[in-house]
Amino acid sequence: MAKKVFEKGKMVPVPSHSIIPERDLYKSPILECSHLGIDFGGLAAVKDFNITVGRTEIAGLIGPNGAGKTTVFNLLTKVYHPTRGTILVDGMDTAGKTPAQVNRMGIARTFQNIRLFNNLSVEDNVKIGLHNQTRYNALSGILRLPNYWKQEKMAHESAMELLSIFDMQDLAGHKAGSLPYGAQRRLEIVRALATNPSLLLLDEPAAGMNPSETVELMENIVKIRDTFHIAIMLIEHDMNLVMGICEGICVLNFGQIIAKGTAEEIQNNPVVIEAYLGKQKEG
Amino acid sequence: MKNLLKKKTTRTDFLTYLGVIVVFVIMFALQQGDMLKNSTQGMLVPVCCFVVMAVSLNLTVGILGELSLGHAGFMSVGAFSGIIAAMSLEQTIPSDLARLIIAIVVGAICAAIAGFIVGVPVLRLQGDYLAIVTLAFGEIIKELINCLIVGYDENGLHVMFNLSGKLSVENLNMTENGVAIIKGAQGAVGVDKLATFPMGFVLVMLCLVIVLNLVRSRTGRAILSIRDNRIAAESVGINVTKYRLMAFVISAAMAGSAGALFGLNYSTLSSTRFDFNTSILVLVYVVLGGLGNIWGSIIAAVVLYVLPEALREFNDYRMLAYAVVLILVMLATNNERFKAAPSRVIPKRRKGAAVNG
Amino acid sequence: MTEFLNYLISGISLGSVYAIIALGYTMVYGIAKMLNFAHGDVIMVGGYVSFCAVFYLDLPGWLATILAIIVCTVLGVVIEGLAYKPLRQAGTLAVLITAIGVSYFLQNAAQLIWGTSTKSYASVMPGNLSLGGVTIPYISILTIAACLIIMVVLTQFINRSKLGKAMRACSEDKGAAQLMGIHVNRTISMTFAIGSALAAIAGVLLCSSYTTLNPTTGSMPGIKAFTAAVFGGIGSIPGAFLGGILLGVIESMAKAYLSSALANSIVFAVLIIVLLVRPAGLLGKYVPEKV
């Protein structure tokens, strides 16, 4: 399927190993990793990680526990600095950038162990996500110049609009730390969206959710992609979710990609089955 | 619900301003009517200074979430630079008020510069390591000022560092009109007592406006987010270094302005007045008042500054009593079993705001 | 050269006292994760107890030291039980302020009992050893020897004994230690007991070297020892030893050759530089937060 790119001789050389959906094929990819790797104390935690993610793709990153999935997210967001390889976000190299700069380049993320600003209100959590969308300096803030009021009003409106994706407007005044688990996960997604990303990384968004909540989440992830026209890459153990919404799936084991493809291809891949279930004995 | 919360914060801010204004008006009326005891009269300006200190340290400890054990160092920088400014301008600017304002501004600027110089290395560290380095800087500032000899004559300022411990004002080679301002370990001498209670009030109000408005702005939210979760703050594009430094420098500048006012309230002032114990004293105000709770800081600063003076009749036992009260209050506000008891001395604390890293 | 040797020895001797105090700091920090600002004042109490034992009771120096150790150990355990134990679940700052309260309390209690005036303390081991132009006070030799012995015994104790193992377990993870049947509260009390006993020894040695004693005697050495513990990497026992010795030598050399007025500043400046290069101290392990 990816070979089409070369046959038609398009403008962007998307590598043949990518699994980009049809509608993104003629656009430059939002994320390109090549030969990405990191060592922890001489041990390669991730090695030779190559992936291309299309503009509006929903991509899945799966693998057994300890495969290095979260490490990949940490590399993409520069929490860790890669030992080898390059990451291009919208064609721009992220080498030497800080996590905050990478966010401004267009990557937003959520965390496996939820990291909200627990002592602040839900609204403030989202407004902090909007930090780089609101423009006034500390002095106008202290003196409450007209610009302060204008920007704060805008921030409030955007925050409410973003919260409405998950029907959370009513919770705006609550402390983030006091929310139930599922709502905290949703708030983290809203906060990430507030930074106006072009690629959203979700680290186990369905963890701790019940089946009906998960179904709702799946719908919402697709809705987010369709509303904001952004790419989403997610780590998830819930196979129904991954197989249900991910257009391209990448399987990681011991820090290396062992398979890439569509849901169907992955499900029937013997190497993947072996990684998850172990080698089946004959007979 | 949302409106309720918003209204609540605005109302708290409003009541804080109102409370400060009311107390000032009462005290000022009493002062003008000559109805205050001498000892109370003498406490008016220092109380204002320590309220500003507590509010400014709350910005670092409560709002930014970094423990600073050297806040008195910035007060010291402000005090001595303010004194130098006020005394060297004595001929040029005859107005006391103008000189006082200039001294406060100079104190704030010098302390802000010191805060920047200290902050750049310090803020690379975290937690207890950061705390110990602020302590170290506080002590360094104290010793450096202890070595400082400054005089002023018609040729301008004369400044000298007494590193060997053998130099004195004579070595400045001033003309006979020269005035010694800071005499090394003796500290500042012959200072004009320019500080006034209304000025203290203005300074308190100014700092309140700065801190309260800052917290409710984009910048303040960024600072709060760093306290709550640094990694998450970075992940949403907040330049952590910039905002930590900004909070630290603003806090230092306010401490400097308080120092300038404080310095101009006494005719002599030695740098040992701003030692580790002073930093700790202010930290106690902040913690007892509640981290991030501005009006709590104000009340704690006023009560705890006045308390040892009020206990003066118990003389020998007063500091002992102070220590016991301090321990009991900490136990009462932080231990679950004590909390259940009706001994609610301190207003509602923001739970979990403690600096846990 | 002899002058240099004299300064070096007095530096090592001073550093040994810092190291002994820092060991107490570091053990308490390692297990209770708290900055015990009252530690310096326990030193002062140790000094006063031994002073009274010698001055009023005419006891020999070694007996006075033992008495000081006993009193301080009890004091340490009592402080921990009354002031710190109820705050086990509270934030670090609450504990810090309480420790400061305890520090004020000890200083002012000492002031009430013994007065504000400086007492002149008779060294528990007077006299000097002359060695080819270099004069070494006996007390310096004793201090250095005591420090080395304490260091070795303490390391063995922590690594070999059952209680030592319990301490290490508690400092890693209190919850897990409790699940393994370790009595966490008792272990923490024992740590305070050991730390305070060390403070008592340090108090006797410190006062013997400086021969003066007043209610604030302990604060500056306390702060310096704390610095030493951070310098070497707080929580690490060899780190506290190394930090203490280095700090003592730096201070002594700075006083002798650079500027006596800025000696403390130089010590603190070295600390700052070390922490900027190695954010967890010389021997400390830097553990970044897991994301």
Image (cartoon, helix red, strand yellow):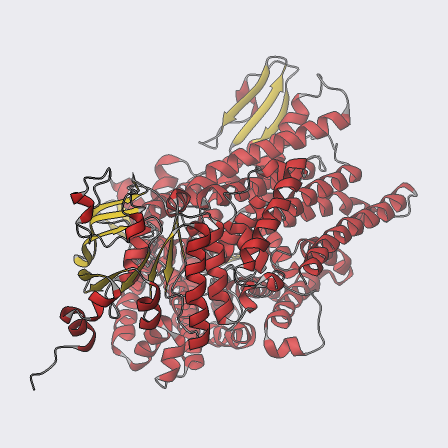
Q: Nearer the viewer, residue A52 or A45?
A: A52
Q: Nearer the viewer, residue C16 or A267?
A: A267
User: Taking the image as drawn, is residue B66 in sight?
Assistant: no
Q: Residue at 20% of width from left, 45% of height from top? A: A5
Quadrant holding the N terminus of chain B: bottom right
Q: Position of residue B91 (x, y in %)?
A: 71, 17
Quadrant holding the C terminus of chain B: bottom left
Q: Is residue B147 above or below residue C232?
A: above
Determine which quarter of the picture holds residue A179. Answer: bottom right
Q: Is residue C86 above or below residue B271?
A: below
Q: Nearer the viewer, residue A43 or B187?
A: A43
Q: Residue at 55% of width from left, 28% of height from top? A: B149
Q: Position of residue C144 (x, y in %)?
A: 30, 59
Q: Position of residue B94 (x, y in %)?
A: 76, 20
Q: Residue at 75% of width from left, 32% of height from top? A: B194
In the image, farthest residue toward the right: B33
Q: Position of residue A240 (x, y in %)?
A: 33, 72
In the image, farthest residue toward the front: A8
User: Taking the image as drawn, is residue C229 in sight?
Assistant: yes
Would residue A278 appear left or right of B337 to someone viewing this image? left
Determine which quarter of the picture holds residue A71. Answer: bottom left
Would residue B35 appear left or right of B61 to someone viewing this image? right
Q: Nearer the viewer, residue A171 or C163?
A: A171
How many dots with numbers? 0
Determine which quarter of the picture holds residue B327. Answer: bottom right
